[in-house]
Amino acid sequence: MEMKREQILILEIETDADVGVCRRKSVSLAGQLGFDEVKTGEVAILVSELVTNVLKHGGSKGRIVICQLQNEDHQKAIEIWCYDSGTGIPDVDEAMHDGFTNKKTLGIGLGTIRRFSDIFEVNPIIKESIDFNVLNNYKHCIRIVKWVPENRWIGTNRSLIVGAASRCIPGETLNGDTYLMSHLSPVKTIAAIIDGLGHGKEAHIASNIIKEQILIKSELPLNELIKYIHLAARGTRGAVIGIVFINIETSKLYFVGIGNIEGFILSASGKKSLISFGGIIGHNIRTPHIFEFPFNSGDSVCLFSDGINTRWNSDDLNWNEHPQKNADFLINNYSRINDDATVLIINHS
C-alpha cells in the first residue's frame, strides 16, 4: 500500500525534562490528526514510555522523529522513530514480558508500547523518505505507528440473534475465558471466544487484553487481525481463540481458529465443523488460515471452549429456540469442573 510520509520534527532526548517536551509535541500533532481524547492519551503514554526507555535503558541520550503518515485511503497516522545510544535489546521477546527489567523499574514499558501501537518494530529498515543524516550516531531504534481510528457504526445487526454463557472454574473469582460480539455495520459482525491459558488472574488478563485489541482493530482482515493480537499478547500467559466474521449481505461466514476452541455451523445441508490449527496467541502460531462458509437465513454457528465437554450432540438441542436458552443449557449441563467454560451461539434469523 502506497504511503505518504511527512516529517514533522526531530527532538533531542537528554534529560528528564525531555519526557514532557516530547509528550506535549506528540499530543499536539495527535490532536491535529484527529485522535479523540482517549487515543490522544494513549499517544501520550507511548511517547512517555519511549523517551523514558531511552533515559533509563538506552544510554541516556537519543532522538525522536515524529512523522505524519497517510495511506492511499487517506487514513492518517502518527509515526514515531525513537533512537538511542545504548547497546540495544538482547532479547526482544523476553523484554516484552511485563515485569522483565535489568534496572530498578517495573519493567512494563515495552509491553505497554506494543499494546498501544498498531505497528511496533525494533531496528526496522530505514525509510529513504526520512532524513536520517542527523541520526548517524544512533544505531538502535524503536518505530511505532498509531492510526487515527475511523468513525465506527454503532448499532445492531437485526439478522443475527446471539446467546452466550460463560463461567470460571469453581473456586475462582476471575474468568480466564471471555467472548465478544461486535457489529461493525448493519451487515457485518465479528464474534469470538478467547480462552486464556490455565485459569485465574493471569488467564483473565491474557484473554481480556486480546479481547480489547480485537475491539480496537476489528476492521482488519481476519488473518491480519490474528497476527496483530498475537503481537499484542506477547508478555501475557497467552490464549487460544476461535473468531468469526459474518457478512449478511454476501451470506458468508469466515472463521480462524488458533488452539482448541471448537465449533460448527448448522444449516439445511447439515453440520460443518470449524477447523482450528495448533498454537497459542502471544507465544507461537502458524500462518493464520481463513475458512469460508455460506451462512444463510436459518443457519446457526456455535463456538465453545474446552471447558465444555464433548459428551453432547447437536441433535440434542432445538436450534429454533432462542440461542441464549441453548447456551445456558450447555453451560449448566456440560461444563467441566476443572476449567473455565464458555459457549457462544449465533442464529441467522
Image (cartoon, grey):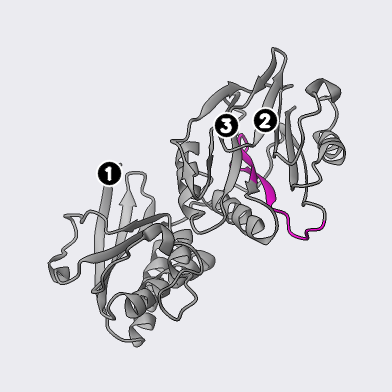
Q: Quadrant of residue 298?
A: top right
Q: Which residue is mark 2?
A: 263
Quadrant containing the C terminus in the rendered view: top right
Q: Which residue is mark 3?
A: 276
Q: Which residues are magenta?
A: 171-194
| Amino acid at circle 1 | Glu
Indicate the secondary structure of the residue bearing disc 2.
strand
Residue 299 visible in this rendered orientation of the protein: yes
| Amino acid at circle 3 | Ser
Give me the C-alpha separation between circle 3 and circle 2.
Answer: 9 Å
Residue shown at 59% from the left, 55% from the top: 206
Q: Which residue is mark 1?
A: 2
Near-viewer residue (245 or 188): 245
| Amino acid at circle 2 | Gly
Indicate the secondary structure of the residue bearing disc 1.
loop
Q: Tell me which numbered mark, 2 or 1, is placed earlier along the sequence.
A: 1
Q: Position of residue 31 (x, y in %)?
A: 43, 68
Q: Is residue 179 left or right of residue 97?
A: right
Marks 1, 3: nearer the viewer: 3
Residue shown at 46% from the left, 68% from the top: 100
Indicate the secondary structure of the residue bearing disc 3.
loop
